């Protein structure tokens, strides 16, 4: 996707128009070193922080650890840097940057952000007039990364869920014989 | 550079995979000093199983391969269902070993000791008497030079070494074998079996017959149900050349196993009429060496073997060794697949499973078996493999819901899903073929293979019936949200990885390459026992048949050697 496409998709996302000069900063990429003990691969610090907060809203700490403790924020950074084609990653980030510009999530608390994410979530799977296709896509992709990242992490696989034991295969057992489902 | 060292063996086996490893074991146990040549790298039981039991979080990108890497290096290999970060080192890079697809053909290749026997799906079904008679009966292809009774004792022999778990069903179209205890079905599979068998008197659903041990055999341990056979098995529970056949061959002290050895061609001596040996290119140094032996077994995979034979040109055989008939490279066929039926069930939410069963269910062929089941729109038949499972936590990404409620919901298994996958027989047709490129060569200077194959009208008609039968069986079993798809576009020949037939057996040297003992009609110390030898495809997964033919051919060849006939 070229820069012009990215900008026009941003316009669709936020339902308005922005000047190209305002947007150029959003598309400039990232190189900011992280304050956390982790070298960011493609995300900027604000993007990394926002995705971490959203990840913990989607998979919060309960009686087991939540998303960021399981490394989901780093997983998102890694997948965006190394798995997805660069154009797709850039498109994804530009849409989330537009979200950031519109709502300034760094200035709102977790409760308010959760309300916002709850709304995005309900719309992303049942698109109404207020959310564009591309915004829904960007939300669903983030949620997919959070869920796949969490449930393939060591915490997600071994603490939150159960790893199938080796030894035998009992293909027809009562559901009640295990407390939680298998992660593999 | 050509160094003409006179290195002599009793036997040379080209290829170390499914059939090569087994040929080596049989030859070595009969006392022959045997050289096994493998074009790929060294690969050893256990120490080479570098991804066995690794969890997603131990693998790069949790096991996923970036689309850009797939496109660049693994455009064909990446289509295999089990291709991921844990297995990609077992496949060739298409970018490094190109071939030419005149028509789309997915040539799946594994260049290491053990070949594709490491990643095979382990399904093992005998052919039946009707499969060896079908060519003669309906006139497609040439008559098989053997019948079921010729191979039956060799099935017994191979199965007792391989170890097959399964259930005897007494079906004429799918003979029983020497089975270890069968694996178990899930609650949903048991239900589907009962519903299908009571709705259709001609149909059976059985547990898959597979080359995975359910009890100890010859010092090999029963399966520990990790569910990731393709990464290698430290307990030798599934059958592979690396873990089972080659160690047996090595134990005799008669085997020389040489990796990185690309066979360029077979050396033919017109004075003796024999294949004297092979020219081998060292994959690393590119030095060429000749090795000599009394008997040569070609087990380099269907297309690999045929490529070498086509490249073995001489005054006597200008179109490839043992190719006076002109059929070498022709009658290529794979099973056609890509018909998938799926459905969901809410009836067994109180049932679940534990352990990863490396196996599924099987619905044997039920068409064109007799006058009752004969079809007017196509000949031969199809079968289904299938499986059932409950959805995992990934389903949380496909619907709304976040937070503690979501976590809680995903602690439960999701709904049951069951799928059936159709596999069909492909008729032997001359135009489905491979040949050598007249100008393109690979990095070792060997002519690239051109492959040209497609599906015929018989296969297409069969697929329509296969879809309808899948639909009606899923309905009979009471599944909801049934969908049946025919993805023929993404399933060209090759992807079932059951390609066969390019050096077929037959009774007549004018229309076939090999006789009834897998011996070249025109070169009596040259044998081909991999999938190239097959005169038809049947519908069964073919490896156990290749193994039975291999043991039979070795027995015959060694008899000829001892009597001085070759």
Image (cartoon, rainbow, N blue to C red):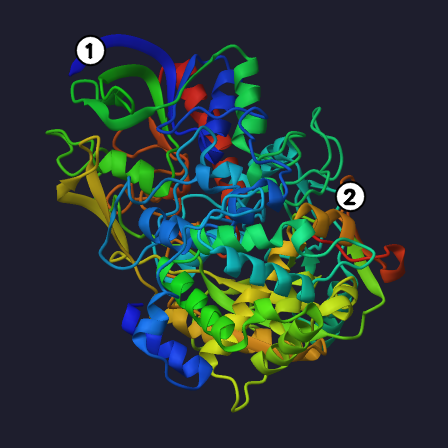
Q: Chain of mark 1?
A: B
User: In the orientation shown, which residue stands out farthest toward the front?
Assistant: A107
Question: x%, y% of residue A136?
Answer: 52, 77
Q: Residue at x 32, y 38 (%)?
A: B304
Question: x%, y% of residue A10?
Answer: 40, 77
Question: x%, y% of residue B530?
Answer: 41, 38
Q: Under tag 2, what secondary structure? A: loop
Regarding residue A44, the answer to whether it shows in the image is: yes
Q: Which residue is mark 1?
A: B4
Give the image quarter of residue A52. Answer: bottom right
Q: Is residue A151 above or below residue B94?
A: below
Horizontal arrangement in the rendering, residue B331 relative to residue B495 (left or right): left
Q: Residue at x 21, y 18 (%)?
A: B272
Q: Nearer the viewer, residue B448 or B73?
A: B73
Question: x%, y% of residue B311?
Answer: 20, 34
Q: Which mark is residue B13?
A: none
Marks 1 and 2, how far apart at CA: 56 Å
Give the image quarter of residue B138. Answer: bottom left
Q: Are marks 1 and 2 on the same chain?
A: no
Horizontal arrangement in the rendering, residue B529 relative to residue B437 (left or right): right
Q: Which mark is residue A165?
A: 2
Q: Nearer the viewer, residue B159 or B115?
A: B115
Q: Nearer the viewer, residue B200 or A155?
A: A155
Between marks 1 and 2 in the image, the one whose residue lies nearer the viewer: 2
Q: Is residue A168 above or below residue B460?
A: above
Q: Under tag 1, what secondary structure? A: strand
């Amino acid at each position: 996707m070229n820069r012009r496409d990215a900008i026009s998709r941003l316009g669709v996302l936020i339902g308005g128009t922005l000047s190209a000069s305002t947007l150029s900063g959003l598309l400039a990429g990232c190189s900011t070193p992280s304050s956390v003990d982790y070298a960011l691969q493609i995300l900027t610090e604000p993007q990394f922080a926002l995705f971490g907060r959203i990840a913990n809203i989607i998979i919060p700490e309960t009686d087991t650890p939540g998303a960021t403790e399981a490394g989901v924020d780093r997983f998102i950074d890694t997948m965006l840097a190394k798995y997805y084609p660069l154009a797709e990653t850039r498109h994804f980030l530009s849409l989330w940057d537009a979200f950031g510009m519109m709502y300034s999530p760094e200035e709102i608390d977790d409760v308010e952000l959760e309300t916002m994410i709850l709304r995005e979530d309900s719309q992303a799977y049942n698109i109404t007039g207020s959310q564009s296709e591309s915004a829904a896509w960007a939300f669903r992709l983030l949620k997919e990364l959070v869920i796949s990242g969490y449930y393939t992490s060591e915490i997600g696989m071994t603490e939150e869920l159960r790893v199938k034991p080796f030894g035998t295969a009992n293909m027809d057992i009562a559901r009640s014989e295990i407390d939680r489902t298998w992660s593999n | 550079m050509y160094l003409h060292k006179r290195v002599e063996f009793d036997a040379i086996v080209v290829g170390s995979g499914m059939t090569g490893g087994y040929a080596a074991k049989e030859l070595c146990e009969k006392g022959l000093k045997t050289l096994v040549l493998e074009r790929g790298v060294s690969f050893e039981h256990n120490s080479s199983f570098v991804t066995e039991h690794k969890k997603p979080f131990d693998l790069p990108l949790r096991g996923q391969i970036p689309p850009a890497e797939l496109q660049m290096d693994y455009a064909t290999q990446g289509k295999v269902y089990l291709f991921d970060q844990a297995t990609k080192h077992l496949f060739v890079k298409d970018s490094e070993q190109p071939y030419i697809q005149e028509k789309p053909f997915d040539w799946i290749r594994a260049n290491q000791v053990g070949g594709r026997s490491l990643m095979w799906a382990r399904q093992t079904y005998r052919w039946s008497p009707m499969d060896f008679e079908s060519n003669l009966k309906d006139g497609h292809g040439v008559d098989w030079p053997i019948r079921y009774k010729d191979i039956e004792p060799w099935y017994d022999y191979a199965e007792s070494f391989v170890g097959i778990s399964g259930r005897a069903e007494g079906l004429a179209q799918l003979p029983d074998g020497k089975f270890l205890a069968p694996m178990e079905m899930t609650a949903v599979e048991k239900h589907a079996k009962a519903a299908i068998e009571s709705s259709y008197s001609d149909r059976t659903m059985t547990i898959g017959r597979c080359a995975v041990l359910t009890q100890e055999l010859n010092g090999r341990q029963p399966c520990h149900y990790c569910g990731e056979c393709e990464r290698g098995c430290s307990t030798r529970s599934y059958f592979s050349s690396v873990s089972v056949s080659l160690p047996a061959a090595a134990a005799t002290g008669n085997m020389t196993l040489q990796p990185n050895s690309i066979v360029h061609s077979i050396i033919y001596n017109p004075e003796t009429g024999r294949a004297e040996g092979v020219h081998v290119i060292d994959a690393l140094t590119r030095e060429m060496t000749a090795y000599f032996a009394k008997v040569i077994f070609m087990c380099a995979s269907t297309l690999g073997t045929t490529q070498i034979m086509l490249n073995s040109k001489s005054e006597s055989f200008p179109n490839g060794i043992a190719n006076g008939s002109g059929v070498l490279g022709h009658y290529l066929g794979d099973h056609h697949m890509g018909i998938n039926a799926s459905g969901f069930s809410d009836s067994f939410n109180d049932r679940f499973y534990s352990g990863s069963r490396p196996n599924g269910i099987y619905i044997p062929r039920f068409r064109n078996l007799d006058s009752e089941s004969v079809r007017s729109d196509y000949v031969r038949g199809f079968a289904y493999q299938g499986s059932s499972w409950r959805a995992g936590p990934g389903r949380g990404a496909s619907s709304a819901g976040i937070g503690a409620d979501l976590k809680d919901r995903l602690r439960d298994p999701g709904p049951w899903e069951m799928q059936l996958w159709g596999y069909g027989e492909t008729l032997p047709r001359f135009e489905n073929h491979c040949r050598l490129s007249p100008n393109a060569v690979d990095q070792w200077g060997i002519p690239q293979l051109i492959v040209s194959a497609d599906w015929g009208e018989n296969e297409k008609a069969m697929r329509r019936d296969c879809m309808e039968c899948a639909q009606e069986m899923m309905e009979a079993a009471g599944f909801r949200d049934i969908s049946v798809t025919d993805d023929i576009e993404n399933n060209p020949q090759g992807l079932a990885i059951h390609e066969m037939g390019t050096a077929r057996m037959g009774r007549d040297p004018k229309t076939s390459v090999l006789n009834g003992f897998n011996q070249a009609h025109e070169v009596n110390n040259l044998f081909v026992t991999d999938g190239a030898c097959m005169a038809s495809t049947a519908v069964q997964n073919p490896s156990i048949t290749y193994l039975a033919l291999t043991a039979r051919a070795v027995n015959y060849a060694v008899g000829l050697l001892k009597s001085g006939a070759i």
